[in-house]
Amino acid sequence: MTITAPSTSSAAPTSPAVDRHELEARVKAMYREVAETPEGDFHFEMGRALAERLGYDPNALDRIPTAAIDSFAGVGHFLDLAAIQPGETVLDLGSGSGMDSLLAALATGNAGRVLGLDMTDAQREKAARLAREGGFHNLEFHAGYIEAPPFPDASIDVVISNGVINLSADKPRVFAEAARVLRPGGRLALADIVTESPLPEKVSCNATLWAACIGGASQVDDYRRAIEAAGFGVQTLREHPEYHFLTESARGASETYGVKSISLLAIKR
């Protein structure tokens, strides 16, 4: 993903003026650590225990490289909503160390194709290496930003994303670009962090809390309206109460402002 100037779209309120250069640097630094030292201390939980608690199939996890699961920092489970079919083309926005991309590659099979997109070199390089070592020939990883995916119009069947869109300061553009690359009737299946009430500037202008998936979270109704304004119909939206933050500062913000994990399925109209 990238950090862009806040959107002025009516689909979502303008974000406070977090320093986007500082934010991008912090996000890259944090997720480089996620890739390289997943055993480190973070605001959020990681790894297989989290994945299984969120609803991932243990048998599917057994079929992909363990190192990708170790660096899994997602916030929910949505692959059942995505219902990826053999032969489909899938785009993973903010693919990280590749766990969701690898699982999507299992689902789409050799006749399909999975494209991972991530701005953090260490994450992308780790994911590509694990895919090669695991013999996944239908999976490739691209450098880029979720606000500007470098793929043709109407070339994708399913767009997926896990815990990444909250990091963008221009969420309407992310959803508009997802709609652009999807074929008519294409599916957007994602998990993300949203809030029940507005975040004050002391939180939303805090680059550390943005990088921790809190400071950039939108109110859930604004988030849904931004998706619908991009040309989607939301079919399913569910909460993941089993997801929680680890540090005291992150838990405090979560409890005060109703920060929570959701997953959803939306269809391009």
Image (tube, grey):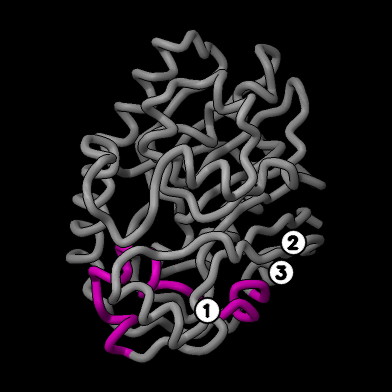
The residue that disc 2 covers is 232
**Residue at figure coordinates x 54%, y 48% from the top left:** 161
Q: For the C terminus, which image quadrant?
A: bottom right
Image position, residue 248 (x, y; %): 29, 74
Q: Residue type at mark 3?
A: Glu
Q: Which residues are magenta?
A: 201-225
The residue that disc 3 covers is 228
Asked if labels 3 and 2 touch by Cβ distance under 8 angstroms, the answer is yes
Dot 1 or dot 2: first in sequence order is: 1
Q: Is residue 189 magenta?
A: no
Looking at the image, residue 164 sits to the left or right of residue 125; the answer is right
Quadrant housing residue 120? top left
Image position, residue 231 (x, y; %): 73, 63
Mark 2, other Cα within 10 Å: few <14 / some 14–19 / many ≥20: many
Q: Is residue 218 magenta?
A: yes
Q: Is residue 87 above or below residue 115?
A: above
Instruction: Assign a secondary structure to mark 2.
Output: strand
**Residue at figure coordinates x 63%, y 21% from the top left:** 106
Residue closest to the eye, 119 or 207: 207
The residue that disc 1 covers is 195
Looking at the image, residue 8 sits to the left or right of residue 41; the answer is right
